[in-house]
């Protein structure tokens, strides 16, 4: 029996542009090996980093940490073939949905890879339905991870 790489099972082909949403190297390595010519983008690639040139120097230079952008202030990805959300626990899952699903409307194919032992399938399907998405197909990636294709 031939085992296809996870990337092939997700429909990621040579030359694809993939938006990979995951917090750890372990999570993002689930797609390895990738076909030649695949471009990987992260959520940080779609944040508008433009700043005002005007600074108030009334009290001297003040160095403040920039406030995180609200999801609606982040740019929408364009030209992405496949989006892959990789999550391992409920808190990460809900935070990730808040940050990404509202921006994913133009992506042709979207997947969620989740650790079924720590993130129950019913939590995943309920979470995506809150954003108007539906489960389409699912399969086990390995003993820990499940893949769920979602559609709008």
Image (tube, rainbow, N blue to C red):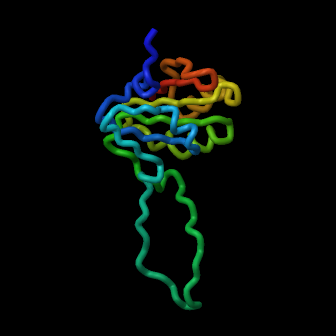
Which residue reaches farthest top? 1
Q: Residue 53 location in percent, x, y?
A: 41, 78
Disc tally is 0
Instruction: Answer with left or right where residue 114 lies relative to residue 47.
Output: right
In depth, the one of 99 and 32 nearer the eye is 32
Identify which residue is drawn at 39% across, 38% down. Answer: 18
Identify which residue is drawn at 35% across, 34% down. Answer: 81
Q: Is residue 151 above or below residue 88?
A: above
In depth, the one of 82 and 152 nearer the eye is 82
Which residue reaches farthest front? 1
Q: Is residue 70 above or below residue 21?
A: below
Instruction: Answer with left or right where residue 47 lies relative to residue 62.
Output: left
Query: In the picture, which quadrant includes the C terminus?
Result: top left
Identify which residue is drawn at 43% across, 36% down. Answer: 83
Q: Is residue 22 above or below residue 69?
A: above
Identify which residue is drawn at 49% across, 18% down. Answer: 137
Q: Residue 74 location in percent, x, y?
A: 46, 54
Q: Is residue 16 above or below residue 4?
A: below
Q: Residue 141 location in percent, x, y?
A: 54, 22
Instruction: Answer with left or right where residue 140 lies relative to residue 34.
Output: right
Q: Residue 30 location in percent, x, y?
A: 52, 32
Q: In which quarter of the image is residue 91?
A: top right
């Amino acid at each position: 029996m031939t085992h296809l790489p996870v990337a092939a099972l997700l429909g990621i082909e040579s030359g694809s542009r993939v938006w990979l949403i995951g917090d750890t190297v372990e999570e993002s390595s689930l797609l390895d090996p990738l076909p030649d010519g695949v471009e990987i983008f992260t959520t940080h690639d779609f944040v508008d980093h433009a700043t005002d040139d005007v600074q108030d120097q009334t009290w001297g230079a003040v160095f403040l940490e920039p406030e995180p952008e609200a999801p609606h202030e982040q740019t929408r990805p364009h030209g992405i073939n496949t989006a892959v959300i990789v999550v391992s626990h409920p808190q990460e899952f809900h935070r990730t949905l808040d940050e990404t699903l509202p921006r994913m409307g133009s992506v042709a194919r979207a997947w969620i890879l989740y650790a079924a032992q720590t993130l129950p399938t019913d939590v995943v399907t309920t979470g995506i339905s809150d954003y108007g998405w539906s489960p389409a197909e699912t399969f086990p990636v390995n003993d820990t991870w499940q893949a769920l294709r979602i559609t709008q």
